[in-house]
Image (cartoon, rainbow, N blue to C red):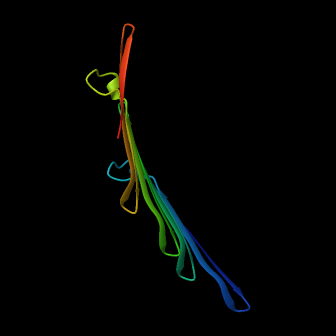
Amino acid sequence: DGSLGLLVRLDNEEEIDGLVSGGLDWSGTTHPSRDDIRVRMAVSNKDRERFRMAMTADGDSQDEAMAGSLGLLVRTDADDKLDGHLSGAVDWSGMTDANQTDLRASMTVINRNREKLHMAMTADGNSRFRERDGSLGLL
């Protein structure tokens, strides 16, 4: 965490009375119940917030599967401009198990707690001798 303040006066009148503060926390990389990385920054002038940004990043990988998410909040003049969340996952562990789909992938985009986009995809294939067959699914 850190902050920087600045006060500028010209002819005994305050022109700038600002504060920039921010923080970076990556302790979540060792605590599974927290986001891996959290970053924040705020800019204010004369005790009024002018800009605020907060971001989170989290991820997990196990065997041949990966999942992750990003969150972003942007606010100017105390008005939320963007409060989004992007998450996704990829799993290719089915390539070694004949009873599973070879590849699964998904992605979701959320803004202001409303889902804007969700996509899920599966791919499966087989090759025996000279024959090849496969399937592709999309949601």
Residue 53 percent across, percent down from the top left: 51, 64
Tell which of 49 and 116 is nearer to you: 116
Residue projecting furthest to the left: 99
Q: Residue at x 35, y 53 (%)?
A: 34
Between 139 and 86, the one lying in front of the other is 139
Q: Position of residue 94 (x, y in %)?
A: 32, 26
Q: Is the C terminus in the top left, top right, bottom left or bottom right quadrant?
A: top left
Q: Is residue 111 left or right of residue 42?
A: left
Q: Residue furthest bottom?
A: 12
Rendered view: 58 above or below 127:
below
Q: How many marks?
A: 0
Q: In x, y percent, where is residue 138? A: 36, 37
- Image-based side of 13 in relation to 38, left or right: right
Is residue 1 visible from the viewing direction of this image? no
* Nearer to me, 112 or 60: 112
Looking at the image, residue 76 lies above or below residue 66: below
The image quadrant of residue 112 is: bottom left
Q: Position of residue 28 (x, y in %)?
A: 39, 51
Image quadrant in which you'd find residue 10: bottom right
Position of 19 with respect to 85 (left or right) is right
Q: Residue at x 49, y 75 (%)?
A: 78
Q: Foreground residue, 85 or 127?
A: 127
Q: Is residue 114 visible?
A: yes
In percent of the image, x 68 and y 91: which residue is there?
Answer: 13
**Direction top: furthest residue:** 129
